Amino acid sequence: MSESVSLPALGESVTEGTVTRWLKNVGDRVEVDEPLLEVSTDKVDTEIPSPVAGVIETILVQEDETVEVGTALVTIGDGSAAPAEDAPAAEAAPAAEAAPAPEAPAEAAPAPESAPAAPAQPEPAAPAAEAPAAPAQEAPAAAPAAPAQEAPAAPAQEAPAAPAAPAQEAPAAAPAAPAQEAPAAPAAPAQEAPAAAPAAPAPAAPAAEAPSAPAPSGGSHAGAPGYVTPIVRKLANDQGVDLASITGTGVGGRIRKQDVISAQSAPAAEAAPARTQLETSPLRGTTVPMTRLRKVVAERAVVSMQSTAQLTSVVEVDVTKVARLRDKVKGAFLEKTGNKLSFLPFFALATAEALRAYPIINSTVDGDSIVYPAQENVSIAVDTERGLLTPVIRNAGELDIAGLAAQIADLADRTRNNQLKPDELSGGTFTLTNTGSRGALFDTPVVFLPQSAILGTGIVVKRPVVVNVDGTEAIAVRSMVYLALSYDHRIIDGADAARFLTAVKDRLESGDFEADLGI
């Protein structure tokens, strides 16, 4: 017994759906709740499950066809019924079985074995066991008689089949027509159409093939190459995918969800940078003596760590406003000053201003005394092939952004080219080290005597943070950086460090540097 599966209701306002893909074929076994097909509506793309178990016998709605809710989509049975696609073959079977019938009388015309073939035709038995003397060539006419009833086009095929004998075929065709109207006398056409027997297979083949590829009836959206379901369109909009750049893999080139997902992931895969191959250093497996500079730095680091009580405090700073200002003016800044505008000059200016307000961070220890310098001489840590050097920006508190950027660029360039004068490496009262230049979030820098503090600036990264918008908390993408202050706890307390860091933080987060650009 077969059951029909109809398009179910998919929402209160949904009246129709488009079949986008069949998940099962005719002859496939399906279980209860197993997906049968995919359907797209104005509001949703979904799979239709089977309400019964059985074998798919007939698919009633083709892919890309739109039908109303309640329309039968497929018939499912126990597998005993012939599938719809096999129906033409079943119809052609009687013709195929009828063909051998005339062969028996051809071999032995009087034999009664021809009688069993008679039921395939209307009442042929009595005229066939009474006329055994009929010519063997005329008996095969029974074969075309059967297809003539099933496929009326057969006579049209027979007419040109034997043009050499039109006089004999014309009478054979004439009785064939009454054979359909008066089945009581089929014997006559059976004896008068010997030439048509070879033509019988010809009409049978197209008759079987014609129904095997039914043209889809097509719904309201069928055949429209530009149609995209609402779900697919929304997905493309959310993912930023241009539908015009996608080649659909669905029926008729329809763009499906999988096409959008593939298109969205493809650029991401292409944009992924190639992995940087690390080169093996020639120093591997060797022993080399320390350079003179490395010895000096090592000795000073050990003395500083053993002679002072060092610790580190860290704050997180939102530099989004600074980043926006920098992006806004960096072109004009480069044109007018000849220097690129990085974040470091902003950090240096905010630091110099905070050192003026909290000079304990800028102080040094002299025996039992604390010395407060009258100026802010900021040392800038520079990474060179020879090691770490710290040239000094003198009177940094008197400079604007342009002046600080020029000093930083000049000192860094001359340090790396070994062109510094000896006094340019001495006299610093505070050190600024940009650990973020190599990608570090932050570190705990070491204070070198005679200074009492050093500020490390981490890498500026964009990430989601909680912000306050008109009194309401929200999550937003912001440019964030960590500032780490290491200091000598002998003279600088944690509260002093916190006040200094908070001053720097507030100055940077305000982003009010336009008057200090110097351009």
Image (spheres, rainbow, N blue to C red):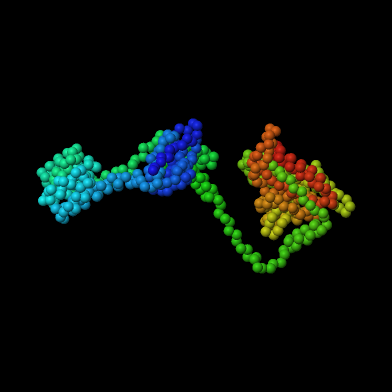
- 305 above or below 510? below
Q: In percent of the image, x 75 and y 59: which residue is there? A: 297
Q: Position of residue 232 (x, y in %)?
A: 49, 40
Q: Camera-side residue: 218 or 386?
A: 218
Q: Camera-side residue: 20 or 186?
A: 186
Q: In percent of the image, x 48 and y 44: which residue is there? A: 33
Q: In percent of the image, x 56 and y 52: which residue is there? A: 273
The answer to which image quadrant residue 471 occupies is: top right
- Residue sticking out furthest to the top: 13
Q: Where is residue 358 in the image (x, y as percent from the top left)?
A: 81, 43
Quarter in which the N terminus is drawn? top left
The answer to which image quadrant residue 357 occupies is: top right
- Position of 360 with respect to 127 (left or right) is right
Q: Position of residue 150 (x, y in %)?
A: 24, 42
Q: In percent of the image, x 76 and y 41: which residue is there? A: 503
- Position of 402 with respect to 107 (left or right) is right
Q: Camera-side residue: 12 or 109?
A: 109
- 290 above or below 192? below
Q: Position of residue 48 (x, y in %)?
A: 47, 41
